[in-house]
């Protein structure tokens, strides 16, 4: 029996047990998905103790040198002290998978070629979002967003990941999903719909696994029990509430569509950015 130190507590791990199995058995809230080393959703960092070689199977040399390992593959031969992967960075220029900025993921020319330089990607996303927008579990997360807009943003995001071209200028996954309460179960459900689409469009199995690994690298940015504040640098922007600003240029009220003159003090929603003229501000206060 080995001791696993994790977030200030100690847990037992049997000789034929993986760390992931041990943590789940003892009721620890621990990220995971595939349980077989493919998705890297459970990846952690070892701070003390010797890892068995199999626990770092499929990781890059840089990740291995920094102590990253996969608890779903790790049957320890020593007591270990481990920490979540988002507690540290590989180095200041190389963000860890699953944090807000995952731009270190390498381009995938084979994937892009299989997607016929974007043509098949467009078809896959049209197929997926048609289903997602009509799905009772997923459609609430697209309130106020058109299907075309959702497809366009995801196309540019994936094109940048697969080609390395700087074509996506939207929010990183953490900020884009900051207000959405998404469970691991819902994340997996959404993933299953996407995998079905990939299969319908005849993407090879090994590329489907790579696609899943990419999406699972953002699981830590998306899955949560309650909304997060948006974070820009070190500044957190609240999920709800209103702020006030004096306009330096004219604008339109997002509620009544009336013009708002320069110099007018208006309220704006902190998450949505919607502006309200003084008349609509009073209506908000009354409600």
Image (tube, rainbow, N blue to C red):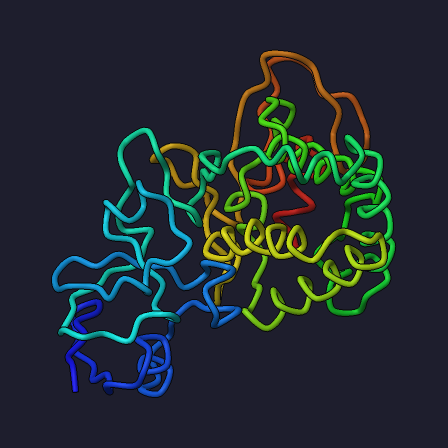
Q: Residue at x 37, y 38 (%)?
A: 95
Q: Residue at x 74, y 30 (%)?
A: 253
Percent coordinates x, y for residue 60 in the rendering: 37, 45
Left or right position of 154 against 222: right
Q: Nearer the viewer, residue 67 or 268?
A: 67
Left or right position of 97 against 223: left
Count of labels in the image: 0
Check the picture and name the quadrant holding the C terminus.
bottom right
Q: Residue at x 73, y 63 (%)?
A: 138
Q: Nearer the viewer, residue 184 or 177?
A: 184
Q: Residue at x 42, y 46 (%)?
A: 97
Q: Can you tell which quarter of the image residue 40 is in?
A: bottom left
Q: Can you tell which quarter of the image residue 49 is in?
A: bottom left
Percent coordinates x, y for residue 23 in the rendering: 32, 79
Percent coordinates x, y for residue 206 in the rendering: 64, 54
**In this picture, is 119 found above or below 164?**
below
């Amino acid at each position: 029996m080995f001791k696993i130190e994790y977030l200030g507590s100690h847990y037992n791990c049997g000789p034929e047990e993986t760390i992931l199995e041990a943590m789940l058995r003892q009721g620890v809230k621990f990220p995971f998905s595939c349980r077989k080393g493919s998705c890297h959703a459970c990846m952690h960092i070892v701070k003390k103790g010797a890892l068995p070689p199999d626990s770092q199977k499929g990781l890059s040399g840089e990740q291995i040198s920094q102590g990253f390992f996969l608890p779903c593959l790790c049957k320890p031969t020593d007591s270990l002290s481990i920490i979540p992967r988002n507690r540290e960075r590989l180095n200041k220029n190389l963000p860890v998978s699953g944090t807000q900025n995952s731009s270190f993921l390498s381009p995938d020319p084979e994937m892009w070629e299989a997607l016929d330089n974007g043509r098949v990607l467009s078809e896959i996303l049209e197929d997926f979002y048609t289903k997602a927008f009509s799905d009772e579990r997923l459609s609430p997360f697209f309130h106020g967003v058109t299907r075309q807009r959702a497809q366009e943003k995801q196309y540019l995001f994936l094109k940048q990941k697969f080609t390395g071209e700087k074509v996506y200028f939207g929010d990183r996954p953490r900020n884009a999903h900051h207000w959405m309460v998404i469970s691991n179960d819902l994340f997996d459900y959404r993933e299953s719909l996407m995998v079905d689409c990939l299969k319908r469009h005849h993407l090879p199995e090994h590329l489907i696994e790579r696609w899943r690994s990419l999406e699972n690298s953002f699981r830590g940015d998306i899955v949560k029990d309650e909304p997060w504040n948006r974070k820009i640098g070190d500044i957190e922007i609240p999920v709800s509430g209103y702020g006030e600003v004096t306009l330096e240029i004219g604008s339109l009220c997002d509620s009544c569509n009336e013009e708002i003159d320069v110099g007018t003090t208006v309220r704006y929603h902190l998450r949505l950015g919607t502006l309200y003229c003084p008349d609509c501000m009073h209506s908000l206060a009354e409600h």
